[in-house]
Image (cartoon, rainbow, N blue to C red):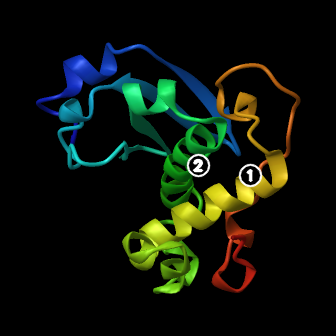
Amino acid sequence: MVLTACAPRVLSAAGWEFTALRTKAQVRLVNAADFGYCSAKLVGCTVPLGQGCVIMLDQTYFLKGTPRQKTLLLAHEFGHCLDGSKLIYTHNRFGHAGEVYGPYYAHAAEGFAEAYARAYIAQCGYNLAPLGWGQGPECVLPDPKAVKPENLVK
């Protein structure tokens, strides 16, 4: 289990759960210093948990972020979750294609997750209700298998 030292603080933190695309996610709003598994320099971290995941979001960044920042963050982290549950960490053979979004996204896992977030915005806008946050209309989420390097949304 990768949530060892931080597990009590993370799992008891404020948050919500949702299921989308038959993947269950537990979202927790915590201080980045409590991420444990991931660098505290990040604003989000996803830890696989069976066929789902625990998504940790820096609570200050998320709660004070613009609608675009919130959507990119949560959809990006859910993209990591889908990478594990639906793509078995193949990252849809992303290679370095994600570097079009910036150097951080050159790694295949980060490139895929960011491309998923951009596809989410293209399909659902800034509506986070499908990911369990706030109110909004239903939206059919992008199929992670359709998020490929040749279909990048900027």
Q: Determine which quarter of the picture holds residue 132.
A: top right
Query: In this picture, is 75 found above or below 24?
Result: below
Residue 78 position (above or below residue 128)? below
Q: Residue 94, how many percent across, how many down? A: 53, 81
Disc 1 to disc 2, C-alpha distance: 8 Å
Task: Report the residue at 22% width, 26% height from top.
Answer: 7
Which residue has dot 2 on it?
72
Direction from residue 122 to residue 4 in the image, left or right:
left
Residue 142's place in the image compared with 18, above or below, is below
Direction from residue 151 to residue 41 in the image, left or right: left
Q: Which x, y percent locates residue 37? A: 20, 45
Residue 100 is labelled as none
Disc 1 marks a residue whose amino acid type is: Ile
Residue 87 in view: no
User: Residue at the spot x=22%, y=18% of the render?
Assistant: 9
Residue 118, how many percent across, how many down?
Answer: 67, 60
Q: Quadrant of residue 10?
A: top left
What's the residue at 56%, 43% (across, down)? 69
Whether pointer 1 and pointer 2 mark residues with C-beta atoms closer than 8 Å, the reply is: yes
Q: Residue at x 57, y 38 (%)?
A: 70
User: How many labels were placed on the picture?
Assistant: 2
Q: Earlier in the sequence, mark 1 or mark 2?
A: 2
Quadrant location, the N terminus: top left
Task: Give the amino acid at mark 2.
Answer: Leu
Residue 149 position, x and y percent, is 64, 83
Position of residue 19 relative to residue 114, above or below, is above
For the residue pair 121 and 52, the one nearer the viewer reads as: 121
Work out whether residue 99 can be spotted.
Answer: yes
Dot 1: what SS?
Answer: helix
Quarter placement of the C terminus: bottom right
Horizontal relation, residue 20 to residue 4: left or right: right
Residue placed under numbered mark 1 in the picture = 121
